[in-house]
Image (cartoon, rainbow, N blue to C red):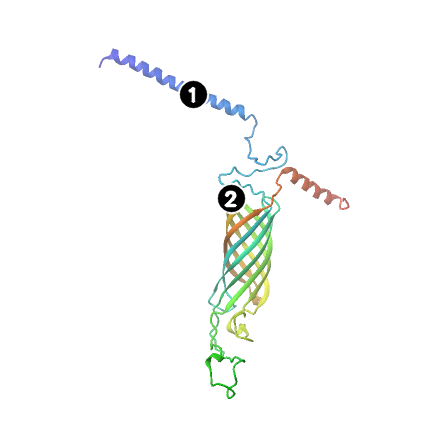
């Protein structure tokens, strides 16, 4: 190898490498200078799409959207979904009932996190009962023996009752708290309290005491639901909801705990004022009335 030929080439390569390093360092310094000149404050710019006054108060903006432009500044959530529950229709029954129906609710949001929810539900299904025999009760519209045609099996009811239809209605209200607030999805917890109405004799023979075959008597009772919701945002005003619940009732003086589940669409309506000036005026108004009850 010719040393005199190799040295000039090595010097050229060294100079080229130094030049490239200098170019890269210079471009990095220019970009850093531009970032510093564009953001002179101590805090980075916040996500404030509605132009709220953030000079005072504890305004905490939502995260930048990575999906639909959802900022949870709506006033109402309207929900309607298909529902399912697994229910034990008598205090000593073994076979549980699979019941289907609907769940309809509306939530009035007070702020980003807290809301008041009203809920109405209906479930219908069939239930197992105790082994039973009623002796074949006679239809009173059939002719009496000796005054008309002979014996007819169609004039008599079945000898046993199996799989009778039962229904439940719930009317409840309570607080709802939004714990997850993201652009693509949100999650809440709720605790609802009210009344339940169980119908256990809608498909039985006349004048039959359904408690003799193991069912609860038809009655109003206490009802409650503890659970949550998971909403996947399709648009800023429409979402798809999955809602599991633990339903609690008190039929016949016994406490029942039953799993429930529903799915369906959520529609968001109205507008919630989340600006710090509105919150400050609201707190000042309550403070004035608290200290001066005669203030008009």
Q: In this view, does 159 lie to the left or right of 220?
A: left
> Split into 4 quadrants, where in the image is the N terminus?
top left
Which residue: 57% across, 51% down? Answer: 78
Which residue: 56% across, 62% down? Answer: 169
Label 2: which residue? Answer: 235
Label 1: which residue? Answer: 25
Which residue: 32% across, 14% down? Answer: 12
Q: Residue 256: x and y, percent?
A: 53, 63
Q: In this view, does 93 lie to the left or right of 77?
A: left
Q: Is mark 2 on a helix, strand or loop?
A: loop
Which residue: 55% across, 52% down? Answer: 79
Q: How far apart are the alpha carbons under marks 2 and 1?
A: 45 Å
**Front label number (2 vs 1):** 2
Residue lying farthest to the top in this orientation: 4
Q: Residue 234: x and y, percent?
A: 49, 45
Q: In this view, does 228 lie above or below 11?
A: below
Which residue is more in the foreground, 190 or 170? Answer: 170
Kindly indicate the quadrant of the structure image that contains residue 119.
bottom right
Q: Residue 139: x and y, percent?
A: 52, 79
- Disc on the earlier residue, 2 or 1: 1
């Amino acid at each position: 190898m010719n040393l005199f030929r190799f040295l000039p080439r090595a010097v050229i390569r060294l100079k080229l490498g130094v030049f490239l390093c200098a170019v890269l360092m210079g471009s990095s310094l220019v970009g850093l200078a531009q970032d510093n000149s564009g953001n002179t404050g101590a805090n980075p710019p916040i996500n404030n799409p509605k132009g709220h006054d953030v000079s005072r108060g504890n305004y905490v903006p939502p995260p930048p959207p990575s999906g639909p432009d959802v900022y949870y500044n709506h006033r109402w959530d309207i929900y309607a979904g298909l529902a399912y529950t697994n229910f034990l229709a008598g205090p000593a029954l073994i076979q549980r009932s699979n019941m289907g129906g609907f769940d309809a609710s509306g939530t009035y949001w007070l702020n980003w996190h807290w809301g008041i929810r009203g809920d109405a539900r209906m479930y219908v299904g069939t239930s197992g009962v105790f082994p039973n025999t009623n002796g074949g009760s006679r239809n009173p519209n059939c002719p009496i023996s000796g005054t008309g045609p002979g014996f007819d099996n169609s004039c008599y009811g079945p000898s046993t009752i199996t799989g009778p239809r039962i229904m439940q209605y719930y009317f409840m209200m309570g607080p709802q708290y939004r714990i997850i607030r993201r652009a693509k999805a949100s999650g809440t917890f709720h605790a609802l309290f009210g009344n339940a109405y169980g119908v256990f004799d809608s498909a039985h023979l006349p004048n039959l005491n359904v408690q003799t075959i193991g069912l609860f008597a038809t009655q109003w009772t206490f009802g409650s639901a503890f659970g949550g919701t998971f909403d996947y945002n399709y648009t800023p005003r429409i979402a798809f909801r999955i809602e599991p619940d633990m339903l609690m009732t008190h039929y016949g003086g016994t406490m029942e705990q039953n799993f429930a589940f529903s799915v369906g669409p959520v529609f968001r309506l109205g507008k919630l004022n989340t600006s710090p000036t509105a919150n400050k005026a609201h707190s000042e108004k309550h403070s004035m009335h608290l200290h001066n009850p005669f203030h008009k």
